[in-house]
Amino acid sequence: MPNESRLKVFYDGACPVCQRDRTRYERWAGEAGSGVKWCDLNQNHETLRAKGIDPQAALLSLHVETEKGEIREGIEAYIALMRRVPRLKPLAWLIGLPVLKPVLRFGYDYWVKRRLKREGRLP
């Protein structure tokens, strides 16, 4: 797999739903998943800061780094991941529609904040 197709994903390894999503993604991605490096944001605060990402912001929204060092966040991060998996490409296209992005972002932000509050991890 070419270097430019590699992604580094900063995800919440303490979140059971996030862990299940990662496992499902890896299963669906198959060989395409070998170009994805998963980094638990809870163990990589210094790495995040070095990339200009506040660890609290990373906790609140998915962040990915492309091989070129570009940071994608939120829905754009999900789109970058989904585009690698043939069965998810249509979904990546759908969630990328300008009319859906703000709605999905609002719902995602609400869900994450509610989960973190319930877990006692949101100040």
Image (spheres, rainbow, N blue to C red):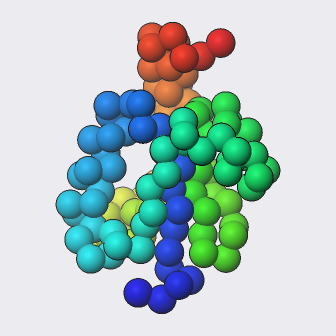
- Measuring from the top left, give residue 114's x and y in whole percent: 49, 17
**Nearest the eye: 101 or 18:** 18
Q: Residue at x 67, y 51 (%)?
A: 47
Left or right: where does residue 30 sit relative to residue 22?
Answer: left
- Measuring from the top left, give residue 11's x and y in whole percent: 48, 44
Q: Residue at x 50, y 27 (%)?
A: 112
- Classify 112 as above or below 68: above
Numbered circles on residues, count: 0
**Nearest the eye: 58 or 14:** 14
Left or right: where does residue 66 sit relative to residue 108?
Answer: right
Left or right: where does residue 40 sit relative to residue 52?
Answer: left
The part of the image, by quadrant, that contains residue 67 is bottom right
Q: Residue at x 40, y 63 (%)?
A: 82
The part of the image, by quadrant, that contains residue 51 is bottom right
- Measuring from the top left, give residue 96's x and y in whole percent: 52, 59
Which quadrant: the C terminus? top right
Q: Residue at x 26, y 50 (%)?
A: 23
**Nearest the eye: 56 or 101:** 56
Which quadrant: the N terminus? bottom left
Does any portion of residue 106 appear in the rendered image?
no
- Measuring from the top left, give residue 121's x and y in whole percent: 54, 17
